[in-house]
Image: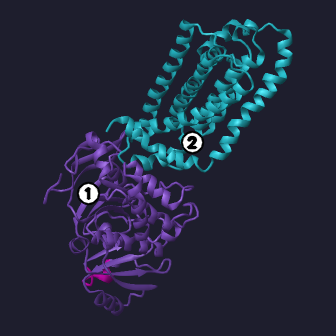
Chain colours: A cyan, B purple
Amino acid sequence: MTSLALALRPLEFFFAQYRRIWRGTAITSVVTPVVYLLALGVGLGVFVDRSADLPDGISYLEFVAPGLMAATAMQLSTFEASWPVLSAIKWDRQYHAMLASPLRVRDVMLGHQAFFAFRLVTTATVYFIVITAFGAVSSPLGVLAIPVTVLVGLSFSAPIAAWAAHTETEVSFVAIFRFLILPMFLFSGTFFPISTLPAPLEVVAWLTPLWHGVTLCRDLTLGDISAWHDLMHLGYLLAFVTAGLLAARMTYRKRLVV
Amino acid sequence: MSTNGQPLIQARDLVKRFGDFVAVDGIDFDLQRGEAFGFLGPNGAGKTSTMRMIGCVSPVTDGSLSIFGLDPARDGVKIRGRLGVVPQQDTLDMELTVRENIVIYGRYFGLARKELGARADELLDFVELTERANDKVEPLSGGMKRRLTIARSLVNEPEVLLLDEPTTGLDPQARHVVWDRLYRLKRQGVTLLLTTHYMDEAEQLCDRLVVMDRGKIVAEGSPRGLIEQYSTREVVELRFDDGSRPDDLSYWTDGLVSRIEALPDRVLLYTDDGDAASHGLHERGLVPESLLVRRSTLEDVFLHLTGRTLIE
């Protein structure tokens, strides 16, 4: 039995669980981009475009839409990988049910990440359709922003699941949202280029997976590819996901194998 | 694969340590196919740690453990596929339906969805939950949840069913229903391995058991055999009003009983003839607040072996 086949088995549980709430999330996944794009891309965009100093004459809508898409994946993942993971260990204990079967700790961990990936694929696809409808995608390469967005999501879901499997209580999750996710959302190039940040903060922004994801998504939707840079962004995201998965394997094992 | 006579599970000098704390301190036991085997002991005796090692979710610290002739450290996937586990704390999903809980659990074992449907119906029938099949788990009573957990643990037709405190927290009526189901499984030839701190549970279900205390096995045998070996046939239980308990009980009971256990709330007198002993006490003028003659139980065995009661 390959490890991947076993890791797919927990998916059925997460799907069954998701079936109860999918309608709500489906509506959210459409409404969220529409609202953001109306407010920022269209509303705020009118003012920004008047000052007209965005690179290559693109509109603010085109600038902000791919960034929002990547940032949404970050938020979705952070939420999905925090409370639900701790709950599966501590409150609802679904992981323990899985571990009584042939499934191993790594199958449980990867299975949950696979579910996050599923949520990310569907959410990113809807997001992409919406931003395309708003006219924010000017290149056919833009469709590749979907897998990149999934990767951005996983670069958060993996390390956050690692943390959730380590922590004893949920109190840190609120702090993570407030002090990591929100600043990243605002200052990682989603709404304005990070070159406008003070130099030290710009360096911090470079380190966030979100900035790499936002930049890569934007290059793709604009069709403005610079191979070397974009491969570096992709490599950074992949490295972040890998490191997150390794950390998760470690904390899951430490928590669940006692 | 185990053959006739070879134990399904064999432990030798099995140890589980958590840091400095020794939870299981070098125990030996064999589980034979078809038997109902129990670990009896109070909370903290090391029963759950032993079960978790057998369930291949907790690594063995020291000693050897072989399950179906396989090594839990290497063959956990294979072993778990042949075990059924009823954990101490339910791990049911509260918001899925009763039936979904079984079907999805079966999927963890790689069973086909088609065959799981029929299997789930059969199992729900066995635990008498057919009428609740499409209800959510949340509103079920504690006893029903337990029965569902048992049904779920049977989905892969396990060779050994591990039950960790199967009826702890249930009311007496619900416990009897669970015992009845387990008894049926036993008659169907399912090998049962259970832990309990209820001596009546051990007496009802176990062909053979070990008494555990502080990580060690202190006695082993059949419930009846243990009682014969470590206790008398009958027990006289005396209760006294505050302050009226005589200090020198042995003076009163001399020659009437073979052993005395003075507990905070009562005095137990061990004798093969309880009526004769009570009669003798009466003649000597000892008047307790209440007097009860009963048969010896595993509780008495445990008390004799450890000086403590099972449920504190």
Q: Position of residue B211 (x, y in %)?
A: 28, 62
Q: Nearer the viewer, mark 1 or mark 2?
A: 2
Residue indicated by mark 1:
B217
Depth order, front residue of A108/A5: A5
| Mark 1 closeness class: few <14, some 14–19, many ≥20 residues within 10 Å | many
How many angstroms separate mark 1 from mark 2 (CA)?
40 Å
Q: Does A49 sit left or right of A121 as displayed?
A: right
Chain letter for mark 2? A
Q: Residue furthest front?
A: A140
Label 2 sits on a secondary structure element that is: helix
Q: Residue at x 35, y 69 (%)?
A: B182
Q: Position of residue B270 (x, y in %)?
A: 29, 78
Instruction: Identify the magenta region.
Output: B250-257
User: Can you tell which quarter of the image residue B217 is in?
Assistant: bottom left
Residue indicated by mark 2:
A84
Q: Position of residue B178 (x, y in %)?
A: 41, 70
The answer to whether A199 is drawn above or below residue B93 in the figure is above
Label 1 sits on a secondary structure element that is: strand
Camera sees residue B277: yes
Depth order, front residue of B241/A132: A132
Label 1 amino acid? Ile
